[in-house]
Image (cartoon, helix red, strand yellow):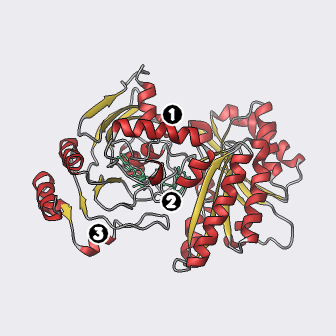
Amino acid sequence: MKEGELIELLSGIVGAENVLTDEIELASYSFDASNIRGLPNVVVRPSNNEEIIEIMKIASETGTPVTPRGSGTSIVGGSVPIKGGVVVDLLRMNKIIEVDEDNLLATVEAGVTVSELNRVLKDNLFYPIDPEIKGISTIGGILAEDSACPLSTDYGTARDNVLEIEVVLPNGKIAHLGTKAPSKQRHLIDFIIGSEGTLGIITKATVKLSPKPEARYGFFIKMSDSSDAISIVQEAEKKGIRISAFQAIYRDALKEIGEEVSADYIDFVGLIELRGDPLWLSSWVPKLREIISELDPVEIEEIEEEGIEGYWSKVSVVHDVMKTKGMTGLSISFTIHKDKMRDLLQRIDQASMRLNLPSITTFHPALGWIIATFLFGPEEKKESERAEKAISFVGEEVSRLGGSIGFGTGIGVSMADQYFKSSPDAVRLLVMLKRALDPKNIMNPGKLIPSREI
Ligand SMILES: Cc1cc2nc3c(=O)[nH]c(=O)nc-3n(C[C@H](O)[C@H](O)[C@H](O)COP(=O)(O)OP(=O)(O)OC[C@H]3O[C@@H](n4cnc5c(N)ncnc54)[C@H](O)[C@@H]3O)c2cc1C
């Protein structure tokens, strides 16, 4: 089908004002928060699931690639239309359909952002999965990525906080999966969650809400050995202390956040948050203080409730650093057994030194989760090739040490090769399932599964 005909058909579905074809408008959909770029042929902005069904039918008939897009904060190129075609911008699907405070549930359209949802909730409730901690990500994007965040230690990832989804499949058929009670369809919901828009477009979801904790308490610590982070978690677990979040910035980024690294040797700066009933906290806080003190911290600062939010921005710096330095980056996110975290942090150092690229590493000791970003100049081809080598080296080390690539931030384009290398059986199974559901490979092609494997 000619592009003009496609645009006409799409305009008939969503209205000409919601079909973007202007060069500058298209360019604004050619990137996300990664270094991946790809220009769409057309962008559509549907406002309901019926429009999405019609869009998908046309795409399926014509074999046109479809890239779903929420807020475009993916750091792995997930929302970039690398094969051109149609970008389906879901931000007009922003209705909060129902908030059921008694049962701690909210039913929302896929384009609702975390901050929009949290804004309408009563003061004592919140949706806990906020991957970039600014509330920009959409519920659809979060479910598609199975996003994680610092609070995932306590609340799990996106899949642990959803009961029902509605998804439009590549053939234009709609599937309602799950119920408001735990259901037998759980495994099918889990099949769509985390599939990164490669199996369909999520249009609606019923997500779980959580009561805000009655009390919060924080420890901001500077330690001289990253293995201390693991010891803190292990000792806390043994003593029955529930750590709700523990995010650390590794030494490779300390200079970037203005830490004085020369005076005392600091290996990481971290924020530990405890949440819950004030009575529990009154027992946990002194025990955790003792655990940390025994490890001889370089510095320990205790933070009362109101101060904690400010400290979160201190340990969530990657994007800000890239912006101030005018650099871009290639990230690898993975989980690894806690005992191997220190080894992997050292491998990241090695890659950074050998390939002469700055890196910024954040890690979550309680989850065994590490995100490393190698920075380079946006126009520096040689540096970007070195960043790919660094990612490849770290990816191989993750596989060798028994870890898993893609936790939280997803695989997208930039991690697809690494994912295949580290989990070939999983990718081969994915290919079979993908071929059955999407025989023309129209849904988000080139993501999650390397193009050559399809
Ligand atoms: C500074 C920063 C920090 C971040 N930190 C984290 C972190 O700690 N943990 C983490 O998990 N992520 C993190 N991210 C990545 C990102 O925020 C998450 O992946 C987020 O869930 C994406 O939401 P979005 O609405 O922006 O989705 P997009 O980026 O628009 O899309 C993400 C993926 O989902 C697909 N998609 C979007 N909507 C739908 C839909 N309705 N149906 C089907 N597929 C869809 C897209 O095609 C794409 O593959 C971070 C990003 C930034 C910029």
How dense is the environment of label 1, judged by Cα within 10 Å: few (below 14), some, or many (20 and up)? some
* Residue under label 2: 75
Q: Residue at x 42, y 35 (%)?
A: 433
Q: Amino acid at mark 2?
A: Ile
Q: Amino acid at mark 3?
A: Leu
Decide if residue 143 is on the left or right side of residue 320: left
**Comes first in the chain, label 2 or label 1:** 2
* Residue under label 3: 26
Please state, as top left, top right, bottom left or bottom right, where the N terminus lies in the image.
bottom left
**Contact flag, marks 3 and 2 (Cβ < 8 Å):** no
* Percent position of residue 264, x then y: 87, 67
Whole-number angstrom distance, CA of label 2 to CA of label 1:
22 Å
Out of 83 and 90, give the one closest to the viewer: 83
Q: Amino acid at mark 1?
A: Asp
- Name the image quarter holding residue 64: bottom left
Q: Residue at x 75, y 70 (%)?
A: 354
Decide if residue 308 is on the left or right side of residue 14: right
Between disc 3 and disc 1, the foreground one is 3
* Residue under label 1: 160
* Percent position of residue 86, x then y: 27, 58
Q: Secondary structure at mark 2?
A: loop
* Percent position of residue 323, x then y: 54, 74
Between disc 2 and disc 1, the foreground one is 2
| Residue 2 badge | none
Out of 394 and 376, give the one closest to the viewer: 394
- Name the image quarter holding residue 89: bottom left
The answer to whether residue 319 shows anywhere in this view is: yes
- Name the image quarter holding residue 188: top left
Whole-number angstrom distance, CA of label 3 to CA of label 1:
35 Å
